[in-house]
């Protein structure tokens, strides 16, 4: 998965409040104004809030890992997307991480926005709520035109219109949203999944969580099962301890029981080469297995503070295969999902992986060069071989996991979390998922299509999905963690359906607000689906 450092799937809880109050003023501090340079496009780094004015140029130039609000004449006109056009009579606020979360919760069309020095003030008042209520009704009307159904939404629309006319702004917005939810199309059969890091401290708490999401309409959970050098279940391996939070009970076995009870598939989400941060048990105990960057350190600088195991080492492969064997034999799971089945981000070359002694020795014996001495521009032929060597290491392991799964549990599905842009996946992270699919090694593929730009989602999906082999189920991973409002979440689910995906997986359960649950249950997930 991808998150704060634009590299992984770590989670912090988010509190979303899509329903506006009658009058509030929220503030946030700007980190940079019209930045030049930086580690990422547009100069927007992790967790930063950027202000772009017309002096910057025509557009912000940012990547898809954030959210932007276009402000014209002091009023928010659009919220969502990236690489936004900068209006001549206004500016663009662009946020990533914590800053994106604030934008998603406090700014929507109609909100008044001002900037004093580096302080943003967003004024959410009755006029803004009335304005936005009308916008939401327009969205509902358009959806109903595209997806007519036997549900008559007129009563909900009329209630919202009556409250708009009487200037009861809070009631108007609440009812406008209900109209929008109820006109959403629903599908009788699809995968409705979510990624989830457990926080429950007992079987009773876990039961309450699963009951809640089953009631919303989810039919699949991908619980984070092996991560940060530990497992949620006991006796995973002598070198893979159970996380302290879960000592004394077995959450994975409880999940399997609850999955059968509530007709929810349980597909453990396991992190492969990423093993956590400096305090990870595996980092301390298996230093000799760590991947090393070209600059010498095992800790990534692009994926800040992340440690990975070296994919070339046979002992690393054997370690994970032994763990997966126990997992497959012990638990009645419905699938196995590989995440971080890749190298750390390896562009530019100086930040690349892996240059440990094993990798250098293996490559030199096969191709006659020490990869650490190669210049990607001056030694193009050898550099291409070096890239292919790294892709090969990941591919070998995917095939080995497939063989193991087919031997022990041939009836379940093997899947992987991958990046939707194949060229980036192959060249930056050496993850050749196209080959894995064509070889028949995966039954499902989860594309991490995290963006607030719905046009980008549609464009990427239209180019991607027709290329997927027919035997592979395609699940599109959507990113509410980026600061989605409910209407954006619902629209992205509609887009994936239009593109022909098998289903969606939301990253992640912790980032869904009560209002998101309401939107899904009342609208998009309205019908309890059949098991996929």
Image: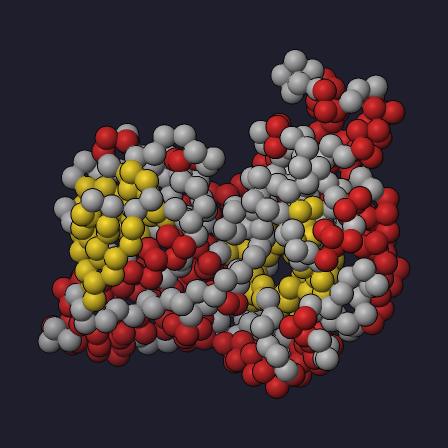
Image height of 489 relative to 360, above or below = below
Residue depicted at 56% across the width and 44% down the height: 304
Residue depicted at 61% across the width and 32% down the height: 351
Q: Position of residue 420 (x, y in %)?
A: 57, 44
Image height of 495 relative to 14, above or below = above
Asked if residue 287 can be seen in this view, the reply is: yes
Q: Position of residue 93 (x, y in %)?
A: 29, 46
Q: Determine whether, in the image, residue 293 is placed left or right of residue 25.
A: right
Q: Determine whether, in the image, residue 178 is placed left or right of residue 293.
A: left
Q: Residue furthest top?
A: 378
For the residue pair 430 and 231, the one nearer the viewer reads as: 231
Q: Determine whether, in the image, residue 88 is placed left or right of residue 407.
A: left
- Tell me the quarter of the image containing the C terminus: bottom right
Q: Determine whether, in the image, residue 214 is placed left or right of residue 320.
A: left
Q: Position of residue 244 (x, y in %)?
A: 68, 71
Q: Position of residue 268 (x, y in %)?
A: 69, 65
Q: Residue furthest left?
A: 166
For the residue pair 284 and 153, the one nearer the viewer reads as: 284
Residue depicted at 55% across the width and 50% down the height: 2
Colour mode?
secondary structure
Image height of 419 relative to 184, above or below = above
| Quarter of the rendering containing residue 148 | bottom left
For the residue pair 29 and 92, the one nearer the viewer reads as: 29
Asked if residue 149 can be seen in this view, the reply is: no
| Quarter of the rendering containing residue 41 | top left
Residue depicted at 62% across the width and 47% down the height: 306
């Amino acid at each position: 998965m991808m998150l704060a450092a634009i590299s992984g799937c770590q989670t912090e809880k988010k509190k979303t409040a899509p329903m506006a109050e009658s009058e509030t003023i929220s503030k946030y501090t700007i980190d940079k104004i019209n930045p030049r340079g930086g580690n990422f496009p547009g100069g927007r780094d992790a967790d930063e809030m950027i202000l772009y004015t017309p002096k910057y140029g025509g557009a912000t130039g940012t990547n898809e890992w954030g959210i932007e609000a276009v402000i014209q004449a002091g009023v928010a006109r659009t919220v969502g997307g990236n690489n936004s056009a900068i209006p001549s009579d206004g500016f663009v606020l662009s946020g990533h991480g914590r800053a994106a979360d604030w934008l998603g919760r406090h700014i929507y069309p109609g909100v008044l926005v001002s900037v004093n020095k580096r302080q943003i003030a967003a004024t959410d008042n009755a006029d803004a709520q009335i304005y936005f209520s009308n916008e939401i009704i327009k969205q509902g009307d358009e959806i109903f035109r595209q997806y007519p159904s036997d549900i008559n939404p007129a009563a909900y629309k009329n209630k919202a219109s009556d409250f708009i006319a009487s200037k009861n702004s809070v009631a108007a917005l609440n009812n406008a949203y209900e109209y929008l939810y109820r006109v959403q199309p629903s599908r009788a059969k699809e995968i409705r999944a979510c990624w989830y890091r457990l926080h429950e401290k007992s079987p009773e708490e876990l039961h309450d969580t699963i009951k809640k999401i089953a009631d919303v309409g989810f039919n699949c959970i991908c619980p984070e099962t092996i991560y940060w050098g530990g497992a949620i279940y006991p006796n995973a391996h002598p070198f893979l301890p159970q996380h302290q939070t879960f000592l004394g009970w077995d959450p994975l076995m409880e999940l399997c029981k609850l999955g059968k009870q509530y007709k929810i598939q349980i597909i453990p989400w396991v992190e492969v080469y990423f093993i956590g941060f400096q305090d990870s048990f595996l980092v301390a105990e298996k230093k000799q297995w760590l991947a090393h960057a070209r600059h010498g350190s095992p800790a990534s600088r692009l994926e800040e503070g992340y440690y990975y195991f070296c994919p070339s080492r046979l002992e690393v492969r054997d370690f994970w295969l032994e763990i997966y064997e126990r997992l497959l034999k012990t638990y009645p799971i419905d699938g196995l999902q590989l995440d971080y089945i890749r190298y750390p981000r390896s562009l530019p070359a100086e930040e690349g992986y892996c240059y440990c002694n094993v990798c250098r020795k293996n490559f030199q014996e096969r191709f006659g060069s020490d990869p650490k001495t190669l210049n990607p521009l001056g030694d193009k032929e050898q550099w291409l071989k070096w890239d292919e060597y790294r892709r090969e290491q990941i591919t070998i392991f995917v095939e080995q996991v497939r063989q193991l799964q087919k031997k022990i549990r041939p009836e379940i599905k093997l899947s992987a979390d991958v990046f939707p842009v194949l060229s980036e996946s192959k060249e930056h992270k050496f993850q050749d998922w196209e080959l894995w699919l064509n070889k028949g090694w995966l039954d499902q593929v989860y594309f991490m299509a995290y963006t607030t730009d719905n046009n980008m989602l549609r464009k990427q999906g239209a180019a991607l999905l027709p290329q997927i082999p027919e035997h592979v189920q395609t699940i599109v991973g959507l990113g509410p963690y980026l600061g989605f409002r409910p209407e954006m979440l619902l629209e992205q689910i509609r887009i994936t359906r239009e593109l022909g995906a098998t289903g969606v997986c939301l990253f992640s359960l912790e980032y869904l607000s009560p209002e998101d649950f309401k939107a899904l249950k009342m609208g998009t997930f309205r019908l309890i689906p059949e098991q996929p």
